[in-house]
Image: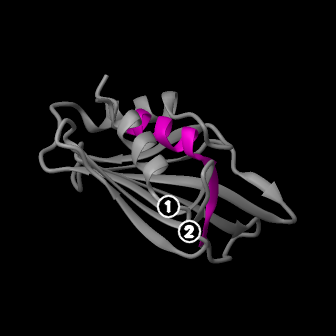
Amino acid sequence: MTLANIVRRKLAEAKPASSRHELLFTDESCPWTVHLTAERRDEWSTVAWEFSLGRGTPFAGDLAAWAERIAGSASGLMETLKVVEVDRERNEALVRSAEPALRDGQLFYYEIVLQGTAGAMLRRYQGAAEVGQKRIQVPFALTNEALAKLAGDLASEK
């Protein structure tokens, strides 16, 4: 079973909730574990605080190539993504919105931090357009279908 199908099935099985809660998606047929912190959920959509994937052992692949794959194929988000940095020494990569959304003088952007080829964490941030303003993490909404597809895109090894 694909990771996207696992997430889709587990979201359908989980009861809707109107307050912050955590969900963990695992399946013995897949090496990935998905952790979702949601602000609220219904039958069709999720307002997510944080969405992460991890696996016990890294897949055999290059971190920079994985970051580029994610930037080129992750869909369902409001902005396209680009690779900002690959730090081979720390074995981390940073992927962000290519062009942050600007609303009422505030920038909104997605950020994915890759930990080697064994973990990815997605968050959304808000920051003032002026330099020197501190960013804050904010929730983001996705349909459950888009969330499942995004999990598959993030976990793609090819």
Residue 136 lies, with reference to residue 60, above or below; the image says: below
Q: Which residue is mark 2?
A: 17
**Residues tagged 1 and 2 counted as in contact (Cβ below 8 A):** yes
Characterize the local packing of mark 1: few (<14), some (14-19) or many (20 or more) Cα atoms within 10 angstroms: few
Residue 81 in percent (x, y) is at 56, 39
Mark 1 is on which residue type? Answer: Lys
Characterize the local packing of mark 2: few (<14), some (14-19) or many (20 or more) Cα atoms within 10 angstroms: some
Instruction: Give the SS element for disc 1.
Output: loop
Question: Magenta segment, which residues?
Answer: 137-154
Residue 2 in percent (x, y) is at 32, 30
Residue 128 lies, with reference to residue 93, above or below; the image says: below
Residue in view at x 17 percent, y 36 percent: 59
Instruction: Give the SS element for disc 2.
Output: loop
Q: Is-magenta flag for residue 110?
A: no
* Mark pair 1, 2: CA separation: 6 Å
Residue 116 in percent (x, y) is at 24, 47
Q: Which residue is mark 1?
A: 15
